[in-house]
Image: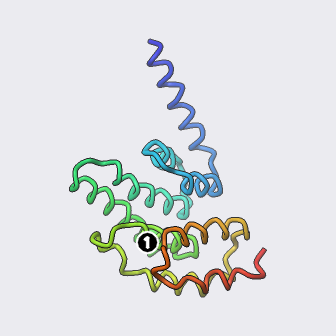
Amino acid sequence: MRFLLITLLCLSQILSLGSNQSLDTVRNEFHHAHTEEDYVAILAVESSDLTIKAYQAASTACLAQFYFSPFSKYEKFMEGTSTLDEIIGVKATFETRYIRLLIQLSSPSFLGYNKMIEQDIQFMTKTISSCKLSSTTLDLLLASLESANKKRYDISALKYNTHGLQ
């Protein structure tokens, strides 16, 4: 009985957090996610915002690392990346392209999810000066890219273009 009560309490916490979370909260949770539970909490957020849905698609792809079977890992990764690509087809913004670029840079090359890296960098370079993200948020996103990039691609233009923003 006590276990059931604790489980229900935890579930209600997750659901109540999910119903009121903003994009800022989801973005922050995604960048600090390390466990399966962290990614599942992001997926529990109910929102029609396509940028939040892009973070959820990326979270789905990231959940693949917690699966044992290589087939299940691949299936989960493809589910997340396919959804992310569909969202970008509907709403290609600086942030949705950033999310895809981060997943591309972070995923193993044998998965083949690296075909849009150059296009995403070009798109982001062109749109960074007009995006409506705060300089603090941009710093977070660019630091994450820098960490995932490991100097494989030239993303210096992104940093250069952030001067003079909010």
Q: Is residue 2 above or below residue 13?
A: above
- In the picture, the quarter occupied by the N terminus is top left
Spot the residue most to the top. 1
- How many tags in the picture? 1
Asked if residue 97 is positioned above or below residue 5 in the image, the reply reads below
Question: Residue 152 or 107: which is nearer the viewer?
Answer: 152
Side of 105 relative to 14 (left or right): left
Above or below, 76 relative to 105: above
Q: Estimate the x, y position of residue 22 in percent, counting from the top left.
A: 64, 53
Where is residue 125 drawn, in percent x and y?
59, 85
Front in this rendered view, residue 63 or 146: 146
Residue drawn at (53%, 47%) of the image: 45
Residue tagged by mark 1? 105
Give the SS element for disc 1: helix
The location of residue 93, given as percent across then percent down, is: 56, 75
Q: Amino acid at mark 1?
A: Leu
- Determine the residue located farthest toward the front in the rendered image: 151
Check the image and report above or below for 145 versus 3: below
Query: What residue is rendered at 59% in x and 37% in y?
Result: 16
133 with respect to 68 (left or right) = right
Quadrant position of the C terminus in the picture? bottom right
Residue in view at x 44 percent, y 75 percent: 89
**Residue 5 spot, x, y in % from top left:** 49, 18
